[in-house]
Image: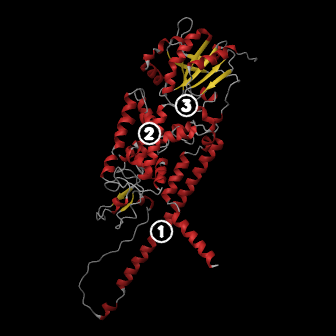
Amino acid sequence: MGNVKSFFIKTGQWFRSHAPTKRRLIQLYAALLTNANIKGVVNGRINTGNNKNLCVPGMNCYSCPGAVGACPLGSLQDSLAQSNERAPFYILGILALFGLMFARTICGFFCPVGLGQELLYKIKTPKVKKSRYTRLLSYLKYVLLVVLVIAVPLIYNGIPAFCKYVCPAGTLGGGVLLLSHPGNAGFYDSLTYLFTWKFTLLVIILVLCVFFYRFFCRFICPLGAIYGFFNRIALIGVKLDRDKCVDCGLCIANCKMDIRHVGDHECINCGECIPACPTKAISWKGSRIFLHGITPPEQQEEEVKPVEITEEVAVTAEPVQEERGYERELEEYKKKVNKRSFWLQFSAWALAIVVLITGLVYFNFIDKIENITTYGVGDTCPDFTLEQVYETAGSLDENGNVLEEFKLSNYRGKVVVLNFWYTTCDPCKAELPDFAKVQEEYGDKIVTAVIHSASSHAASTTAVQNMISRENYLNASSWQLIFTHDTDEANVYGMLGGREAFPMTVILDSNGVITFKWENALKPDTLREKINEALAAEYKG
């Protein structure tokens, strides 16, 4: 009997010593909430609903199949790339709001990438401690912010440089996770040296996170650099009471980040320095808001006056009674604080669980955006009408007038080639000259419409026009291609079964029946072969 009791005692002690902290629970909760689209992970498809227009606080790639919102860093690059035609008020406002409310508390509590780094650091290996060299290296993320996030998108053709060349979250979620799904096996053909570079960089970063605490967060992440500017003025975070501080240095020694003092731009507001402070000089900002109405008792120190010591004074109990009165008030104050703290935490967790369950149910059982009717090989493609966005030789009618729209039914009797692309997709742009050459070879027998994606890569028609104009070395205006722009309402890409892989090519025969579909770059010889099959095909309607 004693052995059984001892077993349960030891088991309970193990669970207590290994139980996750409140911060770890919040990190896990935030990671699950911002990736609540579990259905997308199962079927290997990205959620493209209207909620993707909203930004989540932490770094969480738009292209991750589980993501329910957009990454603020990617949205910032996209907005800056289009700043010549519209001011990026939305994303700048969102970043300012997140910064003023939480600043780098987002890094410490709400960022899934931060959680992943901390879990990797738990692997038992020798660790690289912080030093003046790591502190110097921590400024690299500010360089990356200025160069890759701001300068390159503004100057070089709207390229989202950090997302495209560096971001490991995008490589892992939008690359590896999607490619690992059996239904996306065909995507491997579209991989280029760029994926090799990013995958190699991802592996290097993951390995370094085992030896360096939050390697990516400390040295590379531009989003953390942005939030760091708000650390001093944010509503939530840690603060230092200089009157209580004795400059013992335990807070800095206990912190694994490259801080110079509590709450500076490198501080992720994890709160681990609070219990380490011997004088209780570190506390949470805004905590007084939740204790409003509960006033701590003050022990009055009366002026000491000399009195004649008599037997009556010696035996008086008034000082003892006053001390006991203060102790009772202090005990009552602590009870009120504990009671309010309990109900605040209970209410917060109850609300959080309701929000999480609602999100999981909505994205996995109610949201039908991804369940639209799709058409594949052998189906007749429904008619659709899209706006033309660039004047080319192919966009002119027989009288030389520019057509303002592309209507599929107007081209019945011809083989129609639909090529889906977007402006920052290098494989997409690389194959456009081949499509133009093939179109020229076949002449009036076929029609090729190049459809820019709207739902996944939000670029306006003006941005598309500007991009094609910048790429005029390809002599695009002389092409027989018809440039059009998809819309969220038409969603031609989704209707034809697009799985967020670009470029995608669909070929229709003269009766509008789909004869071929391919979600990768297409070689010219294969394109000719499939066009010939569509020209020779006979379908009975």
Mark nearer the viewer, 3 or 1 = 3
- State whether residue 420 is above or below residue 68: above
Direction front: furthest residue: 126
Tell me the tag on residue 473: none
Quarter holding residue 518: top right
Q: Are marks 3 and 1 in contact (CB under 8 Å)?
A: no
Looking at the figure, which quarter contains the C terminus? Answer: top right
Q: Which mark is residue 455?
A: 3
Q: CA distance from mark 3 to mark 1?
A: 52 Å
Circles 2 and 3: CB distance less than 8 Å? no
Task: Determine crowd level at label 3: few under 14, some 14-19, many 20+ residues with C-alpha closer than 10 A.
Answer: many
List x then y, in percent, for residue 234: 38, 50
Residue 341: horizontal and vertical position, in percent? 49, 63
Dot 1: element: helix
Q: Residue at x 36, y 57 (%)?
A: 239
Residue under pointer 2:
73
| N-terminal-most mark, 2 or 1 | 2
Of circles 2 and 1, the one toward us is: 2
Examine the rendering and report whether any part of residue 233 can be seen: yes
In the rendering, at what x and y percent does residue 209 appear? 44, 50
For residue 332, what is the image quadrant?
A: bottom left
Judge whether 494 appears above or below 27 on screen: above
Nearer to the camera, 291 or 143: 143
- Relative to the observer, which residue lies in front, 322 or 371? 371
Do we see residue 490 in this rendering? no
The kind of residue on which mark 2 rests is: Leu
Q: Amino acid at mark 3?
A: Ser
Q: Kindly state the secondary structure of the residue where label 3 is placed.
A: loop
Q: Is residue 106 left or right of residue 354?
A: left
Q: Which residue is mark 1?
A: 336
State how far apart marks 2 and 3 are (Cα). Answer: 18 Å
Sequence-wise, the earlier of marks 2 and 3 is 2
